[in-house]
């Protein structure tokens, strides 16, 4: 597929539309928004992009990516109004960062594997932090605490592993998983809600690490299972409807039998 030679002009049009919406006489709703009020929409649009990818709906993905880009333009427009920065500064920042962190493409470095790329990326990021006087910052400091917990767990576990704080293999992680299950069972017997929450959290964290060792994205794995559950439960609902029933008017035995049919 050929490159879109007019992409720059189209992006500029988006910037101008956003500026017009925020200007006096523009859209009352857009003019009322702040950095804080737009944040929930940013999260929502992110998940809609992921959903379109999961469904392999490329037409919908093209539209959702437009909504996603609008979020960046919206933030930049508000920043411009407060004389904080311009959209051009944002584009300069990412362009410079990509070139700087890919010296094996734009410079004299050599990278033959993805492992080489990760090493170079890490070295460049470390150099950037020193230049900014941030070398004393905690290793986990850059991981946003506002991330969804599953994504946060992925990032902090990967960062710790990057400096050697890690298991040696997946078998050790599985052993830890059994250990956490035993601790969860003990907490269940004690009927302590606080301890149950603590142990469930430990169990989930170990599962995230097990997924990392097996090179599986736990977020995508769970989304896949959620989608599978929706499809199978939908089958149950349709079959029950054919019998003049609803799930609430059925029983577990009937629904389990239909579940097994759905799996086939």
Image: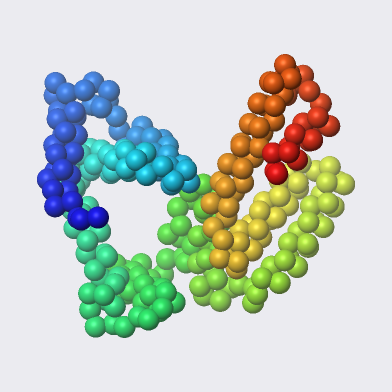
User: Image quadrant of residue 216?
Assistant: bottom right
Answer with the quarter of the image where residue 71 lies: top left
| Residue at image point 47% right, 43% down | 55
Q: Residue at x 60, y 68 (%)?
A: 213
Which image quarter is the N terminus in?
Answer: bottom left
Q: Is residue 172 left or right of residue 137?
A: right
Q: Is there any visible trace of residue 104 in the rendered image? A: yes
Residue 150 visible in the current orientation: no
Count of labels in the image: 0
Q: Nearer the viewer, residue 1 or 12?
A: 1
Answer with left or right where residue 187 lies relative to residue 124: right
Residue toward you, 48 or 176: 48
Q: x and y percent of residue 103 in the render?
A: 27, 76
- Residue 240, above or below 131: above
Whole-percent x and y of residue 60?
37, 39
56 vs 203, nearest the viewer: 56
Task: Give the x, y percent position of residue 20.
Answer: 14, 30
Residue name at image x 55 percent, y 71 percent: 161
| Residue plotted at (14% across, 21% down) | 25
In this view, 163 is above or below 153: below
In the rendering, at what x and y percent does residue 130 appear?
32, 72
Placement of the C terminus among the 4 image quadrants: top right
**In the shown orientation, is residue 6 left or right of residue 186?**
left
């Amino acid at each position: 597929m050929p490159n879109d030679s007019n992409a720059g002009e189209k992006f500029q049009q988006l910037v101008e539309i956003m500026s017009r919406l925020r200007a006096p006489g523009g859209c009352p709703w857009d003019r009322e928004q702040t950095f804080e009020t737009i944040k929930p929409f940013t999260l929502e649009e992110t998940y809609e992009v992921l959903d379109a990818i999961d469904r392999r709906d490329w037409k919908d993905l093209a539209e959702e990516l437009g909504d996603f880009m609008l979020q960046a333009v919206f933030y930049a427009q508000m920043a411009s109004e407060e004389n904080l920065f311009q959209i051009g500064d944002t584009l300069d920042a990412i362009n410079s960062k990509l070139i700087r962190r890919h010296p094996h493409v734009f410079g004299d470095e050599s990278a033959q594997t993805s492992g080489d790329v990760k090493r170079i990326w890490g070295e460049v990021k470390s150099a950037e932090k020193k230049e900014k006087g941030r070398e004393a910052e905690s290793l986990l400091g850059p991981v946003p605490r506002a991330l969804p917990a599953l994504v946060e767990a992925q990032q902090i576990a990967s960062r710790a592993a990057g400096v050697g704080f890690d298991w040696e293999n997946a078998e050790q992680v599985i052993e830890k998983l059994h250990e956490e299950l035993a601790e969860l069972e003990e907490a269940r017997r004690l009927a302590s809600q606080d301890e149950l929450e603590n142990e469930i959290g430990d169990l989930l964290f170990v599962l995230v690490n097990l997924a990392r060792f097996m090179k599986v994205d736990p977020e995508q794995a769970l989304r896949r299972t959620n989608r599978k559950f929706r499809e199978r439960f939908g089958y149950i609902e349709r079959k029950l409807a054919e019998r003049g029933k609803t799930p609430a008017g059925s029983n577990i035995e009937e629904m389990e039998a239909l579940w097994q049919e759905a799996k086939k």
